[in-house]
Every structure is written in structure tokens, then in C-alpha cells.
């Protein structure tokens, strides 16, 4: 892979979380998020527990809190949407000032807000501490079909190339006075998009021919299949295990 | 449209994940050997393309903008199986690398944004291509309608999931109206961009449009796409009216069914009607008896009014820019 291995959400580091094999982080992320989602919204203490687990993991990962919080901005549209729910929600309503606030709507808003935020936080943790090649290898070891992993790896590899090409096209269009305001101005953009598709596809054809020239026969070289020690799994899944304990406790109490 | 964690309960999310995995498995098997050997780099680059195009925000009306989902576009260009796979990869990678969309909602997001859009987009496109005369312009109009319908279908899939496992708080009918209403607009933008993209590709490399493989090839490659603004305005109106005639009657009867589900599950109160009656209250026209005809009439009036207002705004903006 040419250029940097990094992507938008990645934070370069050498912490224990960074060095954890990607498949353990993927499983841990899934278990953590499923625990969060299965918790009833009224168990507020449980969500504090999840947040604490996430914060301890953040501390171990040496990712600066400021970096972490700004990367969670992806959550923002849903925060805004969730804030809307109490106003359009169902009966019974309670009066707060001049507004009639739906009580189930309020609960639902809290439910979405807290779960979406914790989920996004956990996802940002994975993205921040895992490099793309490791993530793809992890997916492959978790038995994701090799074809999907291969498509994903080509996508990541050429994403910057294609996006850069598109950016340059738009700069060129802007330099020639294109300034889209209404839907009627979308035509040049879409035509540029069509041209971009043809270029991407033809690049794919060239890449394939280059691969054939280097002996590609439709099979993928298998990456090293070193076994991961059981101890690493257990240590790596500890945060997820704590999340499961919190989820079970929230269900029983 | 990327759903975060917590919107839909665990059981429904898990069900959607199973359905999505099944759909991906079927696509993988159908794409078979050809994909493994030849098309992997092509699929990867198309995925990069869809990813890049999703960053393209297009203006819908003054102030608001939407971005392309790309499911119908990928299906028309690559065929439904490969198209669905490509958008699936895009959605999964957005969740894992960019925290866009929740991990527990991954099945839902793949189902709504990749499988439903690709399959519905492809079916509508192929059906229209059969009905319309075999010409390049038909492919352009068909892809516009197919993309618009695919977006509304995706929004409808969300509403069904919400009615099954939503966390409650908002009546299903309210969600249905909001989602389908907003996405009818977004669908028009998606349709416009998809049609223009397909038109451009057809003009330069018609062999790359899988959905139009049976079209006679255009021999004169230097001829530009003959689609003008007028064609697209007319195409957009046709797409909107198709939505009104085909989807509106379904939508007007669907809330009862969905609400029944919601009531059975015990989290829905009846939605209250708008306090102001208005001549188009409840999407019917006073004085028209048949509910279906009334809905369609109301929808048509709505489309006409929206079109007129949109045209007026566009003309005003254009004039202001000219001065």
C-alpha cells in the first residue's frame, strides 16, 4: 500500500490497545455494543458503567481525549434528531414551560442518545487504534468471505486516488465558474460523476491486467496465519466481559 | 441514513443481520467464479467510487442538501448481485473505519442501504426498460425512476423495522410520513444524479452499463448525451407522479397495518390529526369520495404545488444571481 497506512480516524500509537490483534478488537467491539443496546434505558447506572469501561480503554490506548471527542462528531446529526423526538412523540405529554413534551418520547430520545453515543465511542476506539491492513486481516481471520475482504482492500487502497481525482475535477469546475446552488446546477456535477465512474472502472481494468502480468490466477496469497494465544484473547476481551457483566446485572436488578 | 446503535431493538437488529447475511451470501454465490477471478479489482474500484460519490452533497432546495446512496446506480452499472456486494462493502467499511452507522445496526444498514436499494433499483429499472422503447433516453429515464423508487423503498424498509422493533416514543404513522416524505424529495435528487451519471457512461462506454446490455450500441461515440434540462424536469415530474400513483395508495393503507402491529406490540398511541383541517387534510381531497382516488388526487396536487414552488424558487435564485 503506497503512502500512509492511516485513515481519517486513525491515531498512530504503540499502546497495548494498538497492539491488540484486530480480530479481538472487532469481537470486543461487537460484544460491547450488543451489551449496551440490550440494556433497558431506565437503568441509568448501567450506562455510567459502560462509559467508565470506555474511558478506561481510552486511557490505556493513549489516544488524547480531545482527538477522541472531535472524532465522535459523527454522532451529532443523531443528537439533533433525538432532541426532536420529545416534541413529536406520543401521549402522555407533560408540560415544560410553553412546550408539551411527550414522556415516552423523552425516554426514547435518551435511549437513542446514550446508546448511539456509546456505540460511536466504541467504534471510534476501534478506528483510532487499528490500521487498515490489520483490520482487513482481522476480518479475514474472523471468516469474512475472502472476496469481500479483497473488494474492501481494493476500495481502501484506491479511495484516496478516486476521491482525489474527484476533488481535482471539482476544483477545475469551480475555477471555470461552476457554483452549484439549485438542483438545476447538478448536471455538470453528475456528468463529472459519470466520467469519474468510467475512469475508476478503467483504472480497475488496468490494475487487473497488471495483476495478471504478475501471475495473479484468481487465488489470494494467504497472509500469515499465526495463532493468537488464548491469554491474549482473554486479556483483550476483558472490557467486553465487564460490559456483559453490567448488562446482566442491569437485567437482574 | 446511517442508523446508529439504539434506534432499533436487539431482536430486530439481529433478524435484519441474518437477512442481510443471507442476501450477501446469495449475491456472493451468484457472482461466483467470475467475480473471484476478474472483477475483484473492478468491484473494489467501483466501491471506492461509490464511497467518493457519497461524499458529494447535492443541493435539493435552498439551504438543504442530500447525498447519494448509490445502491440503484451500482446495480444499474454492475448488475444487482455485484452492485449489492459493492455497496455492502462500502457500508461495512464506513461503520468500522469511520464510525458511521452503529455496529449493532450493521445488519439493518446493509439491508436498507445496500440490498433493498440495489434489488429494488434493479427490478424497477429492468421493468421500465422492458416497457419503454429500446433507446438510450429510455435507459436514462428508467434509471431516474429506479433510483427515486429505491430511496423511498429504503426509507420504507426503515419504517417497517421501526414498527417491528423501534424503541417507541413516536407513532409509526408519524415516522412513516416523515421518512417517506423526506425521502421522496431525496429520491428525486438521487434519481437526477443517477440518471445523469448513467447517461454519461452510456454516451462514452455503453458496454459498462450492465442494466442496458441489451440496448443497441450507440455507434457515434462523439455524440453527447442528448438529455437537456427539460428532459430531466419532465423525467423528475414523471418519477414524482409514479411515486404518487404507485406508492401513495399503498402508503395510505399501510399505516393501518403498521399501526396494528404497533398496537399489538403495545407501544403506539393513535396519531393525532393535524389541528388545522385544510382542504388536503389526511392526504384526501374533500368532496372526493373514493379514498384511493382522493389520495392520488391529493398527491398529484401536492406534486404540482411543490413543482410550482420549486420552479419559482429556482427562477428567483437564478434571476438574483444574474443581477
Image (cartoon, rainbow, N blue to C red):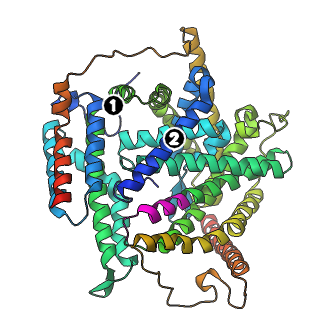
Residue B96, quarter of picture: top left
Q: Is residue B200 visible?
A: yes
Chain name for mark 2: B
Which element is circle 1 on? loop
Give coordinates of residue A151: x percent, y percent.
50, 29
Residue B38, quarter of picture: top right
Query: What mark, if any, has residue A6 been given in the picture?
Result: 1
Q: Nearer the viewer, mark 1 or mark 2?
A: 2
- At 44% from the left edge and 74% from the top edge, which residue is drawn? B263
- At 42% from the left edge and 79% from the top edge, which residue is drawn? B269
Give coordinates of residue B317: x percent, y percent.
60, 68
Depth check: B61 or B177 in front? B177
Q: Is residue A82 left or right of residue B283?
A: left
Q: Main secondary structure of the magenta part?
A: helix
Q: Which residues are magenta?
A: B155-168
- Inter-mark Cα distance, 1 to 2: 32 Å
Query: What mark, if any, has residue B22 been given in the picture?
Result: 2
Chain name for mark 1: A
Depth check: B29 or B84 in front? B29
Figure quadrant of the C terminus of chain B: bottom right
Which element is circle 2 on? helix
Give coordinates of residue B154: x percent, y percent.
55, 56
Residue B163 in magenta stretch: yes
- At 42% from the left edge and 55% from the top edge, which residue is drawn? B12
Alpha-carbon neighbours of circle 2 within 10 Å: few (<14), some, or many (≥20)?
A: few
Q: Give the vertical position of B22 relative to B58 (above or below).
A: above
Amino acid at each position: 500500500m503506497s503512502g500512509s497506512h492511516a485513515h481519517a480516524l486513525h491515531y498512530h500509537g504503540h499502546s497495548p490497545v494498538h497492539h491488540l490483534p484486530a480480530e479481538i478488537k472487532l469481537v470486543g467491539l461487537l460484544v460491547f455494543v450488543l451489551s449496551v443496546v440490550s440494556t433497558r434505558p431506565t437503568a441509568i447506572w448501567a450506562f455510567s458503567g459502560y462509559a467508565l469501561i470506555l474511558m478506561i480503554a481510552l486511557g490505556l490506548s493513549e489516544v488524547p481525549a480531545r482527538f477522541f471527542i472531535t472524532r465522535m462528531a459523527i454522532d451529532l446529526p443523531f443528537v439533533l434528531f433525538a432532541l426532536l423526538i420529545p416534541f413529536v412523540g406520543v401521549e402522555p405529554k407533560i408540560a415544560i414551560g410553553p412546550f408539551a413534551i411527550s414522556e415516552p418520547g423523552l425516554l426514547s430520545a435518551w435511549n437513542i442518545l446514550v446508546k448511539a453515543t456509546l456505540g460511536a465511542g466504541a467504534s471510534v476506539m476501534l478506528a483510532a487504534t487499528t490500521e487498515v491492513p490489520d483490520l482487513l486481516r482481522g476480518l479475514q481471520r474472523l471468516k469474512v468471505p475472502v472476496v469481500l475482504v479483497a473488494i474492501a482492500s481494493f476500495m481502501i487502497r484506491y479511495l484516496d486516488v478516486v476521491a482525489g481525482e474527484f476533488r481535482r475535477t471539482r476544483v477545475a469546475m469551480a475555477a471555470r465558474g461552476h457554483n452549484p446552488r439549485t438542483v438545476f446546477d447538478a448536471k455538470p456535477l453528475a456528468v463529472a460523476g459519470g466520467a469519474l465512474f468510467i475512469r475508476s472502472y478503467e483504472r480497475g481494468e488496468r490494475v487487473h491486467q497488471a495483476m495478471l502480468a504478475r501471475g495473479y490466477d484468481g487465488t489470494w496469497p494467504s497472509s500469515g496465519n499465526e495463532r493468537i494465544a488464548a491469554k491474549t484473547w482473554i486479556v483483550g476481551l476483558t472490557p467486553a466481559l465487564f460490559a456483559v457483566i453490567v448488562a446482566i446485572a442491569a437485567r437482574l436488578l | 441514513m446511517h442508523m446508529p446503535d439504539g434506534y432499533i431493538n436487539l431482536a430486530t437488529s439481529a433478524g435484519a443481520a441474518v437477512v442481510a447475511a443471507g442476501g450477501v451470501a446469495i449475491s456472493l454465490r451468484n457472482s461466483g467464479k467470475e467475480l473471484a477471478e476478474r472483477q475483484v479489482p473492478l468491484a473494489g474500484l467501483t466501491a471506492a467510487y461509490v464511497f467518493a460519490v457519497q461524499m458529494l452533497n447535492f443541493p435539493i432546495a435552498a439551504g438543504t442538501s442530500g447525498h447519494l446512496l448509490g445502491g440503484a446506480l451500482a446495480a444499474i452499472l454492475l448488475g444487482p448481485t455485484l452492485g449489492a456486494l459493492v455497496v455492502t462493502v462500502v457500508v461495512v467499511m464506513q461503520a468500522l473505519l469511520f464510525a458511521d452507522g452503529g455496529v449493532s445496526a450493521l445488519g439493518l444498514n446493509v439491508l436498507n442501504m445496500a440490498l433493498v436499494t440495489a434489488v429494488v433499483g434493479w427490478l424497477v429499472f429492468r421493468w421500465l426498460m422492458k416497457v419503454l422503447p429500446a433507446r438510450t433516453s429510455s435507459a436514462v429515464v428508467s434509471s431516474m425512476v429506479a433510483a427515486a423508487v429505491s430511496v423511498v423503498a429504503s426509507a420504507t424498509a426503515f419504517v417497517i423495522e421501526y414498527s417491528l422493533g423501534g424503541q417507541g416514543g413516536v407513532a409509526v404513522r408519524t415516522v412513516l410520513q416523515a421518512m417517506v416524505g423526506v425521502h421522496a424529495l431525496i429520491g428525486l435528487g438521487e434519481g437526477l444524479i443517477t440518471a445523469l451519471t448513467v447517461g454519461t457512461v452510456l454516451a462514452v462506454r455503453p458496454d459498462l452499463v450492465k442494466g442496458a446490455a441489451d440496448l443497441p450500441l450507440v455507434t457515434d461515440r462523439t455524440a453527447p448525451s442528448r438529455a437537456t434540462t427539460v428532459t430531466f424536469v419532465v423525467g423528475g415530474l414523471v418519477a414524482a407522479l409514479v411515486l404518487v400513483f404507485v406508492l401513495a395508495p399503498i402508503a395510505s393503507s399501510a399505516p393501518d397495518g403498521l399501526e396494528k402491529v404497533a398496537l399489538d406490540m403495545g407501544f403506539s398511541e393513535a396519531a393525532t390529526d393535524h389541528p388545522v383541517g385544510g382542504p388536503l387534510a389526511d392526504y384526501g381531497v374533500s368532496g372526493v369520495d373514493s379514498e384511493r382516488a382522493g389520495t392520488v388526487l391529493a398527491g398529484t396536487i401536492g406534486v404540482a404545488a411543490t413543482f410550482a414552488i420549486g420552479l419559482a424558487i429556482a427562477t428567483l435564485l437564478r434571476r438574483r444571481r444574474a443581477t
